[in-house]
Image (cartoon, helix red, strand yellow):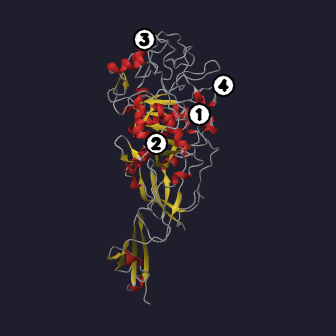
Amino acid sequence: MRQVLPPPSRVLVLSMLLSSYCIFFSQQMLSQEDYICVYEGDDPGLGDPGGGPPAEPHNSGSIDPADLAAFEPKLFNVYYWQINDANGNYGENEVDGDFVFEQTEIDALKSIAKLNQIFNEYNIFFKYRGADQMDSPSTLVSFPAPACSETALNNFNDHGFSVLDLCLSGELHSYALDSGNYDDGAINVYIPSRTTSFGGQRLNSEDIVINRATLNEGSFVHEVGHILGLSHTFSNYYSKITQGGVVTTATECEHVSRIMSDTSFNAIPIDALNKGNGDKILDTNAVPNFIREYCWNNGISPEVSSQACTDTINTNNLQYYNIDNCTYIGSGRDCEETLYDIEPNDVQNYMAYTENICRNQFTIGQAIHMHEDIEEFSNDYDRIRALDFSSLYEPYKGNYYFAGPYDNETNTVLFQPGFDYKFIRCEGNYNEPAPYGENFSFYTTDVIHEVDAYEFDFTEYYHPNHTAVVIEQIDDAFGFARVEKCYNNTNRIAMGGRVVRFNDGVINYNTTTTEKSGTEINDPTTINTLDPGLYKIEKDYQNAPTTQTVILKENE
């Protein structure tokens, strides 16, 4: 009997008390790939372990791979929205939204593939629930935030939310909820054509608005890391300071020491008095905000609200001035004046403020923290977490052929990219795919079609007739192989084929082959017209393996 996945222990959903928004600097400041998220590290939100020993379970501080492997795999749903103006056009050039939407779907699929390519290693998975468009209102529902500039309001009047200023992101989200442009069971990702004064924002605990230019970059992974409970690696790296840049205390920042017996150690929660500082992750070293470190070193407040720091950085083009080749080359110190001990992996962490091209990894401690946060606050994650993994074995597009005329576009079902798939031969009476968890016969070594996680020709992710689905990342996560959704439709009509006669009356290479059209190969009287002998009838199908039937025609 084949194994089936154990049911999840409970349904989990996400809610974060923190808010975050991200600055997307102009070309004059940074390249278009650079994207900065403002997520205040001194706002603990759900990441705060609270008081009383021992530390809260979701902040254990573990960096043990065995602890990570012990967590149940988790699956979250994601839905994407293209934001048009009130007339259904996208962007400042007012391109018809329907025309752009084809590329939006491609970008969304690439985005979901990237999430899985990165998070699957840590047993976290994402299901592509689809993409759609929404039009902006013609007028604002309520008076915008006082921070709205005349330029921001003019952009709205001309382009709606399709060119979005930070001051109107809340308006966008409220309108999306009120107008039904919202998937209640998923992380909703809203994609304006351009953002001004920011790059992206977590609209509430589990929805995101993001600049289209960074949808498929490490910055989107960064935002999802926030959603799953991670802080910036540099959180509160500076101690509290006055407007003039005078240090008032050196106890609130994360210290360099990683020796737990050291009186300076404060990297993770230990007891009621030492709740941990910074991002509260043991295997991410204490680091500065690599963009604003210059301000800290020169007595200028490095906080995001410090205009003096922003002006200094812009005027002198000081972004990432202590990073070279994704390696820290500075000699900065923490707020205790201890020299930083920064490794290349700290510069390359997804949750650092670093060049986007450098972002390529999480740590084991961060992965454990995400799982612990999800499980500790399981009730808050219910909305966006899938009940089981059955949806990953369902196509995102197309309808399975059952009977009648076959339409190539409609009846070609496609699976989301980002996984390694094998479609193996199966048996059974399944003109529609077998139910999830059904037992059936299959042949593991008879692979009809396979696609790897980095294939971006999305037409390759089809489900051939007479095959079942294997997803290697799911098998790895659960520790055993599973085969799902046998599709063995016998109603399909062949496109063509051939009749092969074995001239010696035995199966060998002495054959005569006669090609047949679709009409001829599907004609039930074809066999009646054959002379006595041994034959092989081959039938070819679109997006399905060729079938072979050996018959012995005798004298009648």
| Mark 3, secondary structure of its residue | loop
Question: Label 2 sits on what residue type?
Answer: Ser
Question: Label 1 sits on what residue type?
Answer: Asp
Q: Which mark is residue 54?
A: 4
Q: Residue furthest right?
A: 52
Q: Is residue 43 left or right of residue 539?
A: right
The residue indicated by pointer 2 is 138
- Picture coordinates of residue 73, whole percent (x, y): 56, 43
- Find the distance from the CA under tag 2 to the CA under tag 4: 54 Å
- Picture coordinates of residue 6, whole percent (x, y): 62, 49
On the question of residue 258 being in view, the answer is yes
The residue indicated by pointer 3 is 299
Question: Label 3 sits on what residue type?
Answer: Gly
- Find the distance from the CA under tag 2 to the CA under tag 1: 40 Å
Q: Which mark is residue 212?
A: none
Above or below, 500 against 385 in this view is: below
| Mark 1, secondary structure of its residue | helix
Q: Judge the density around disc 1: few (<14), some (14-19), many (≥20) Cα neighbours within 10 Å.
A: many
- Find the distance from the CA under tag 4 to the CA under tag 3: 38 Å
Looking at the rendering, in which quadrant would you find the N terminus? bottom right
Q: Judge the density around disc 3: few (<14), some (14-19), many (≥20) Cα neighbours within 10 Å.
A: some
Whether the residues at callouts 3 and 1 have beta carbons within 8 Å, the answer is no
Question: Label 4 sits on what residue type?
Answer: Pro
Give the residue at x 63% y 34%: 376
Q: Is residue 257 left or right of residue 451?
A: right
Mark with earlier residue (3, 1): 3
On the question of residue 123 being in view, the answer is no
- Find the distance from the CA under tag 1 to the CA under tag 4: 16 Å
- Find the distance from the CA under tag 3 to the CA under tag 1: 36 Å
- Picture coordinates of residue 12, whole percent (x, y): 61, 41
- Picture coordinates of residue 526, whole percent (x, y): 40, 82
